[in-house]
Image (cartoon, rainbow, N blue to C red):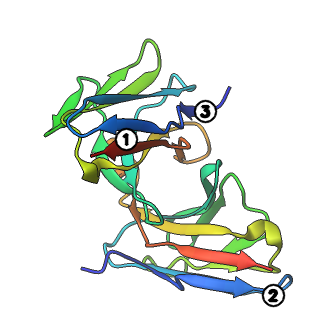
Amino acid sequence: NAGVTQTPKFQVLKTGQSMTLQCAQDMNHEYMSWYRQDPGMGLRLIHYSVGAGITDQGEVPNGYNVSRSTTEDFPLRLLSAAPSQTSVYFCASSYGQGASNEKLFFGSGTQLSVL
Amino acid sequence: RKEVEQDPGPFNVPEGATVAFNCTYSNSASQSFFWYRQDCRKEPKLLMSVYSSGNEDGRFTAQLNRASQYISLLIRDSKLSDSATYLCVVNMPGAGSYQLTFGKGTKLSVIP
């Protein structure tokens, strides 16, 4: 059981470049989300999805796009990378609402540097 | 007031010691509470959920105090392998579908 698979593990971009972080889960989870983690800031929610075809903004959505065409996949797109987007990105999934279903399973993270 | 607050530490404790962390939350309507563990440069992993009656898992005990709006994590007989950052996570209802809010974490170093 692979769980949450996130790629790439490392990425270096130049300002203005675009890229897509991939996230896939094989647990049939309805809820998927993207976080960024910066020193001293903790994990902050970028975008989330409660099911295929449904996405919503989190705390820090600017500069990022998402889509959820299937239950399994939830890619995060950086439209025009900026140095402020240098961070560690985590994808996470869960079954959904309710304390017993809210356990988040995380991908292994992507270290992104924007020069 | 920040939604979820934790003492960042670091807490430096000797092996075998007992250590406790607290986490305060601002939304009195919050219903779900968790402790996650994050090792350096790794993803967070669920350590335990926190139930109203308190719960224990081996050397770890979690408690919830709704009146004062805080949760706690107690680690007994600390091991070197307990060294990590411990994240407090709280559900914030009413934020447009449910969203879990993470504290910034408390760093624990267990010293030989």
Using a 10 Å C-alpha cutoff, classify the residue at mark 1 as few (fewer than 14 neighbours), some (14 to 19) or many (20 or more).
Answer: many
Name, please, the residue furthest toward the right.
A16
Name, please, the residue furthest toward the front.
B112
**Residue B33 figure quarter:** top left
Residue at mark 3 to residue at mark 2: CA–CA distance: 34 Å
Element on which disc 1 rests: strand
- Any part of residue B3 in sight: yes
Element on which disc 2 rests: loop
Residue bearing mark 3: B3
- Chain of the residue that carries numbered disc 3 in the rendered image: B
User: In which quadrant is the C terminus of chain A drawn?
Assistant: bottom right
Point out the tag, 1 or 3, that comes first from the N-terminus.
Answer: 3
> Amino acid type of disc 3?
Glu
Which residue is pictured at 55% across the width and 76% down the height?
A110
Residue at mark 1 to residue at mark 3: CA–CA distance: 14 Å
Which residue is pictured at 55% across the width and 48% down the height?
B97
Total labels: the figure holds 3
Residue at mark 2 to residue at mark 1: CA–CA distance: 37 Å
**Residue B19 figure quarter:** top left
Q: Kindly indicate whether the residues beneath marks 3 and 2 are on one polypeptide chain.
A: no
> Amino acid type of disc 1?
Phe
Which residue is pictured at 64% across the width and 48% down the height?
A40
- Chain of the residue that carries numbered disc 2 in the rendered image: A
Q: Is B19 placed above or below A95 here?
A: above
Q: Is A91 placed above or below B97 here?
A: below
Using a 10 Å C-alpha cutoff, classify the residue at mark 3 as few (fewer than 14 neighbours), some (14 to 19) or many (20 or more).
Answer: few
Closer to the camera in the image, B66 or B17: B17
Residue bearing mark 2: A17
